[in-house]
Image: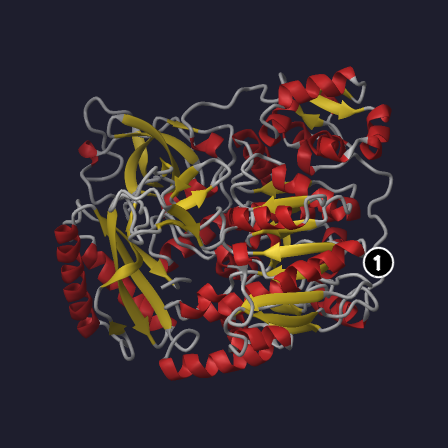
Amino acid sequence: MPASSTPPGSPAVTQIAKIGLDVPLANTFDFLIPNELDVEPGRLVIVPFGRRRVVGIVVAVGAESNIPLEKLRAIESVRSDMPAVSADLMALFQFCAAYYHAPIGQIALNAIPPMLRSVKRLPDKLHASMRAVGITSAGRLAIEALPVRSSVQRSILQWLADGPQLESALRQRHVRSSALLKRLREAGWVESLDASAMPSSFAAANPSTTTTPSTNTQSSAPALNHEQQAAVVAIIKVLDPGADGYQAFLLDGITGSGKTEVYLAAIAEVLRLGKQALVLVPEINLTPAFLRHVRSRFPNHQVAPAHSGMSNLARFVAWRSAQDGEADIVIGTRLAVFTPMPRLGIIIVDEEHDASYKQQEGVRYSARDVAVFRASQARCPIVLGSATPSIETLDNVARGRFTRLVLRERAVVQADLPTVSFVDLDAEKAPDGITQSMIRAIDETIKRGEQALVFINRRGFAPALVCGGCGWMPECRRCSARMVFHRGIKRLRCHHCGAEAKLPLKCGECASTDLHPTGQGSERIEDALTAAFPDRRIARVDRDSTRRRGSAEAIFASAEKGEIDILVGTQMLTKGHDFSKMTFVGVVNADGAVFSADFRAAERMAQQLMQVAGRAGRAQLPGRVLIQTRFVEHPVYQAVASHNYAAFVSAALIERRLMHLPPYSYLALLRTESRNAAALDSFLHRAQQLAKSTLAETIEAGGLRVWEPVTATLERKAGYVRKQLMLQADSRRSMQQFLTSWIDALRSVDSRAVRWVVDVDPVDV
């Protein structure tokens, strides 16, 4: 039937739109386009879907459909409050859909701000009723005069010192914002302002990331050393009019080598050319520190954040600001890689090795890898920075795909790498997790007026409660994992599904009341340090202690000012922070990774230890690292001691080549879960059969193997049994060709009782 024909009673149509929806179905959906609607690819539209009305994105417009026109429903309306997504961004969505074998609707609609995914229209006067607050001259004077215990008030005043902020943004940062504002107003330190007082349209909705306009276009930058200058010259050379525009750089710089200054110098050149810069950081908690650097360096340029911790309004305005070209610099976590930027001139991926760049739920994309594709697409340079580059990135350098820029000197003159030594736990006891050797080292550090950091990559008080009578330990009812004892809240908590339970009064097996914590977590280490240093200022940084908005930022700000003597915490402390008085780093309970079955565990362990060791001695003061371990001779510990990450990588590459593991092969995992174990086994058996038959039919399938299904590392999570099937190929091309055919066949299998997803290039197996 021709597309121009109209079923009785239906609206007049001329064309058909293929629309992506936020549903886990691979195909797009065909809808009729009423004549009165202007529809083009990239437009957000509202369509009927079942009994609901949902927002979709137009992927293509054509004149044919495989479905009879009388069965098609019509688009209801087009979102006029949102310009069409650009062709470049739509091409990026298409690439992700093809490479990660995911629905384009899920990719696109999860990248778009939540306010635009709602069928509700945005208010015509979005900013009219917003109230802002600004700091007074008295408030500026009060910042330094406030006592240490007033850290929250000080952090608010410091935040306002950069320019007026919305009261709604303050409510995101602090739960008791109304009471805090009342006290600050009564003290005469802040004042209410109209939204019109904000410096720009972007500031009106998200001022926490902008600055007060300045008469200078750029603040003074520190002088670069020879290595930094050479790196900057290489990067900006790609920006020359006659250059190709695209080149991928690995900025391989030891901790404290000044990679951030290289980023900022490159951004300065991009801004001079009238282009935009996109900066990715691995964690939300690193965003404020980087924003401060950028705001101070470029006070007359707009900076937009992009991460999931922002309010829906802030995310919407940041997106629109970047899309309209108003925001010159976008800084965010992995989701920011999809931010629309019409003048994109450079992409920077800080800590490129970090596993946080890999999405672990929904569409399992790697933001780092997507960023490389986007830079190639935009013909602009991309800089991947790290002191401990991933083995895959180093392999890309070896294959000539990336250009390596090396920083081997610390940026601060006379700032040497810290000395690394060990405490043998077989020779010295560690009650409550800390040896006397470490206590003495911390004491010496604090007495010199310096700061100490104690790292333990496990939160909570103790990994488990243990019965002294029979050895029973309480387990999560929904996961194959023990419940973690959190003494601060006097509860047991599962770190996998979030379930909580009261502390048991007696053993669940023998009814003994002899229950005691075993092992160490960050809470227990904090208690031990408090007992050893009762008069010192100690702050714990982990996911539990920084749940409130702005709490992590306040702790880091206090540490930078020297108001904290000892920081104790998890991996949140290992990267991106620069504390000039931090001279000692202690590492507790790091041996767990030694026994991991994941082939990447040693790489992650080396990266984590070298990153946290790099927090020590970043200024002129000498640094020291002390690691408690039972495996002093382990290759990872020896690499850390000699600051020789390259030696570790060389040894790891030999092992991977022998075992035919990435980067010498390519992996994909079929991850499955179900409440019905029999249904799960049946589905996996059928999936394996289809894989073998597909393999026999696939062209260029040499070197492609289908492994036996195995249980996941965490066999049960939130009540679901979990298993996986691994695929391995010699080339990316053969893997992609195989997956395309196999997944099409897999979608025909009855899987109503099973949830499954294909994870391409998994980071944990």
Q: Nearer the viewer, residue 481 or 376?
A: 481
Q: Residue at x 74, y 28 (%)?
A: 164
* The C terminus - image quarter: bottom left
Q: Is residue 255 above or below residue 190?
A: below
Q: Nearer the viewer, residue 685 or 748?
A: 685
The answer to whether residue 193 is visible is no
Helix, strand or loop for disc 1: loop
Colouring = secondary structure
Q: Residue at x 56, y 63 (%)?
A: 608
- Residue 406 drawn at (x, y percent): 68, 73
Q: Is residue 47 above or below residue 484?
A: above
Q: Is residue 223 above or below residue 405?
A: above
The answer to whether residue 425 is visible is yes
Asked if residue 608 lies left or right of residue 516, the reply is right
- Residue 396 drawn at (x, y percent): 52, 74
Q: Nearer the viewer, residue 427 or 404?
A: 427
- Residue 3 drawn at (x, y percent): 26, 38
Asked if residue 159 lies left or right of residue 75, the reply is right
For the residue marked with disc 1, what is the amino acid? Pro
Residue occupied by mark 1: 222
Q: Residues within 10 Å of mark 1 (few under 14, many from 20)?
A: few
Asked if residue 350 lies left or right of residue 595, the reply is right
* The N terminus - image quarter: top left
- Residue 569 drawn at (x, y percent): 58, 51
The number of callouts visible is 1
Residue 165 falls in image quadrant? top right
